[in-house]
Amino acid sequence: MPRKKTLICIKCKVSETKDGKYCNKCRNDSRKEYFQKRYVDKGGYAWHRTITYKFKNRQELLRKASKKCERCGWNEVSEVFEVHHKDRNRDNNELSNLELLCPNCHQVHHFIEETGRFNRIFKG
């Protein structure tokens, strides 16, 4: 059965509809409300963080490295550690390819190797 189309928005009863029951503003408002409610119902930011593979890999690396930089052993603030891809392939997220480094060691490594953001400085 085809969807019944109306000429005036059934929510605000003022604006003209483009193709259906709602005007653009009411359609966008209802979509925004729906997704905000769904986000909150699932647990908000905490839920979103825990489902990402990056978060899970980071937690596993922190556990494996005992919350220390794998090069220098720095362990003051574990929240600032950076995940380094040994083979430079950001799509390869195997734990054997990842290394947990403090920001200083990570930048020094890329500076010495002339990779990452330092690639543009040295090569052009």
Image: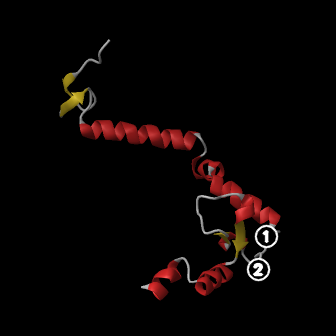
Mark 1 lies on residue: 67
Residue 9 in view in this figure: no
Residue at coordinates 42% horizontally, 85% vertically from top-left? 124
Q: Quadrant of residue 102?
A: bottom right
Q: Residue at x 29, y 15 (%)?
A: 2
Please name whichever residue, 115 or 67, is drawn nearer the observer in this view of the structure: 115
Left or right: residue 11 compared with residue 49: left
Q: How many residues crowd around disc 2 within 10 Å: few (fewer than 14), some, or many (20 or more)?
A: few
Residue at 56% over, 83% down: 114
- Give the x, y percent position of residue 48: 59, 49
Residue 6: percent from the left, percent from the top? 21, 22
Residue projecting furthest to the top: 1
User: What residue is pinned by disc 2?
Assistant: 71
Residue sitting at 80 percent across and 68 percent down? 65
Q: Looking at the picture, does residue 54 appear above or below residue 19?
A: below
With 124 as the anchor, is 45 left or right in this view? right
Front residue (pair 107, 38): 107
* Label 1 secondary element: loop
The amino acid on which the numbered mark 1 sits, given as a three-letter code, is Lys
Marks 2 and 1 close (CB-CB < 8 Å): no
Q: Is residue 71 visible?
A: yes
